[in-house]
Amino acid sequence: MNKELQSFSRNIASQIFIGGTGLLFLYRADTKPGLVYYEFFGLYIVGLLLLTWSMYMALSNATILRNDYRDYLWRQSKKFDRIRLMKHSEKEDNKTSDILKTFKGLNFVDVIKFRFEGACILLMLFLFTIMYMLGIIAILFQQAKAFGF
């Protein structure tokens, strides 16, 4: 599971930096004195593109983490010979909840371990959302202060 968590955390800094820069461009375009819309249209476009790209990368990282958790559960179900209890023999055809249901007959400690890891993954996704929003706002303020906006 360590390798999967490292792949999740690899791009967090770049996502936050790109999102904060996108917000900075939008902020700068809105605070120009004597705003003429067509003169600063490029700032709006670049800001929205950077912000959208950052959100896309954040969502793809969350999806990758979810799929890595499903892969981990699949490997554990192979280890405990639980694949025969599933509706489909292919990993891609089964939902994460269906894979978890096959662990019901196992030792209580093993079931609690799988449930606890799932709860930790959900907690990480929730905290990642909060950290992402706070991070791009912090980068916006840091860059605005650095450039004197």
Image (cartoon, rainbow, N blue to C red):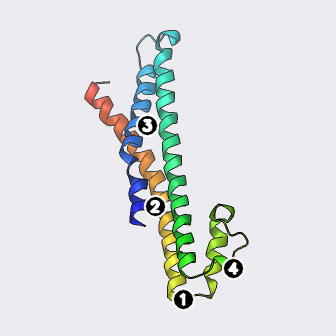
Residue 120 sits above or below residue 111 on the image = above
Under circle 3, the secondary element is helix
The circle on residue 126 is none
Tag of residue 85: 4
Marks counted in the figure total: 4
Residue 74 position within the rendered picture, expressed as x and y whole percent measured from the top left: 57, 70
Label 2 crowd bin: few (<14), some (14–19), many (20+), radius 10 Å? some
Query: Residue 24 at what x, y percent from top left?
Result: 40, 29
Indicate which label's residue lies in the foreground, 4 or 2: 4
Q: Position of residue 19 (x, y in %)?
A: 43, 37
Gap between marks 4 and 1 measured at Cα: 18 Å
Instruction: Choose the circle earlier in sequence order: 4 or 1.
Output: 4
Which residue is under mark 3? 19
Task: Say which label, 1 or 2, has the lower sequence index.
Answer: 1
Which is nearer the N-term, disc 4 or disc 2?
Answer: 4
Q: Which residue is mark 1?
A: 108
Specify few, some or many for label 3: CA neighbours under 10 Å numbering under 14, 14-19, or 20 or more. many
Q: CA distance from mark 4 to mark 2?
A: 30 Å
Residue on which disc 2 sits = 124
**Disc nearer the start of the sequence (2/3):** 3
* Residue at the spot 41% in from the left edge and 16% down from the top edge: 32
Name the residue type under label 1: Phe
From this viewpoint, which residue is outermost toward the bottom?
107
Q: Residue at x 41, y 54 (%)?
A: 7
From the viewer's perspective, tell me whether residue 82 is left or right of residue 29. right
| Helix, strand or loop status at disc 1 | helix
